[in-house]
Amino acid sequence: MKYLSEFQDPQLARRLLDDIHATVTRPWAMMEVCGGQTHSIIRHGIDQLLPEQVELIHGPGCPVCVTPLEMIDKALAIAALPEVTFCSFGDMLRVPGSDRDLFRVKSAGGDVRVVYSPLDALEIARREPDRQVVFFGIGFETTAPANAMAVHQARRLGIGNFSLLVSHVRVPPAIEAVMRSPRCRVQAFLAAGHVCSVMGVEEYPALAARFGVPIVVTGFEPLDILEGIRRTVRQLERGEHRVENAYPRAVRAEGNPAALRMLGEVFEVTDRAWRGIGTIPGSGWRLAGAYREFDAEHRFGVGDLSAEEPAECRSGEVLQGLIKPRECAAFGTTCTPRTPLGATMVSSEGACAAYYLYRRLDPAATTVKEAHPVG
Ligand code: SF4
């Protein structure tokens, strides 16, 4: 299939791998930021084809996984209200809150609906003016423009029974938080290509310079990932720390100007809590003042709700790349996709789900490469 199979060509993959093997002279640890990249790496066994010295550390780039427990509980509280139609993408329905998930709310009579776009939720609000229609707006810079558009349209069309439960997060502050962690072993980043297709790359040179790390914008197919790794290894071996775009078919340096304008109009930067990690300054968006009336947290009075993460779930360490999923004692025993303790086991981009799907029977794929002293 054009545009897909051509980026999975085994001959080209072999050539890229040969180049990586020929370039590497010592141990390096790099983080792929995006959960989609993690799944592609594990699914295609890319990490197992790399030289022993190259370690891929899985990053916090799964939007469902980093949505904090308290935000899930807020969604559950709102969805259970009799006057509310709660709309969400399907992958949020099985994410566990403190005592239930959205499926449970639905089975108990809640009006919870799966939609494919925030504009679908807006259309429900237009057709059903007696309902309070709430869309669960989670995700990184990739999903934020469409959610901003829905709120912008609601205001323009005077659809007052629509609101957004906002849990948007931003990648660059997360990279900074990873680098500031005292346990950080990351020496380079494969930046998420789809995020950069919206935001461009302007925020990255300062990060690369401040922390002395190469940042290579990388796509999602096997050849994209291998090319990102190849460029990253080349920089590391040369002692460079530049920003490179290895995904030019989707990413321009300036990003998507229309999407950026919409984000700037509807959202403003705020501190945001990340599941298992804590609050990262400036790492999220909330609705700007002119759109605050569409904020579901404010409309339904759930802003003060807080929650404790379950102690046995180590997803915070998984999301920071400090452990691999199989190092969590609950992996595959008390925690499975059917009985998830954390969102990283539920989400289609979660690292625990990736290891459960593709590696749970592989005893070699258990731990981080402690043997590799890096830095
Ligand atoms: S395996 Fe389950 S309990 Fe362990 S970190 Fe992953 S989601 Fe949490």
Image: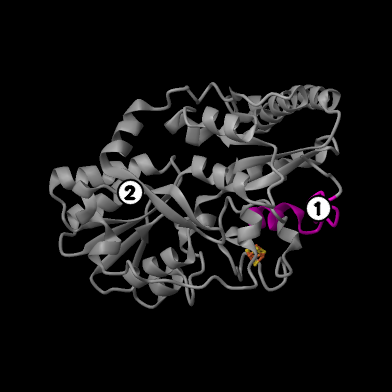
Q: Residue at x 71, y 54 (%)?
A: 355
Dot label at residue 352: none
Question: Which quadrant of the figure contains the C terminus?
Answer: top right
The residue where tag 1 is placed is: 365
Residue 355 lies in the magenta stretch: yes
Q: Position of residue 331 (x, y in %)?
A: 71, 66
Q: CA distance from mark 1 to mark 2?
A: 38 Å
Q: Residue at x 73, y 26 (%)?
A: 230
What is the crowding at mark 2: few (fewer than 14 residues within 10 Å), some, or many (at least 20)?
many
Q: Is residue 362 left or right of residue 209?
A: right
Q: Are marks 1 and 2 in contact (CB under 8 Å)?
A: no
> Could you say which is closer to the camera, residue 297 or residue 8?
297
Q: Secondary structure at mark 1?
A: loop
Is residue 40 in view from this perspective?
yes
Q: Residue at x 47, y 70 (%)?
A: 101
> Could you say which is closer to the camera, residue 317 or residue 128?
317
Q: Position of residue 42 (x, y in %)?
A: 71, 45
What is the crowding at mark 1: few (fewer than 14 residues within 10 Å), some, or many (at least 20)?
some
Q: Amino acid at mark 2?
A: Pro
Residue 17, relative to residue 78: is it above or below? above
Task: Give, as a single range, the part of the protein colored magenta.
Answer: 351-370
The residue where tag 2 is placed is: 118
Q: Earlier in the sequence, mark 1 or mark 2?
A: 2
Using the rendered view, name the quadrant where residue 363 is placed.
bottom right
Using the rendered view, name the quadrant where residue 55 is placed.
top right
> Could you say which is closer to the camera, residue 346 or residue 246?
246
Q: Amino acid at mark 1?
A: Ala
Colour basis: one colour
Question: Which quadrant of the figure contains the N terminus?
Answer: top right
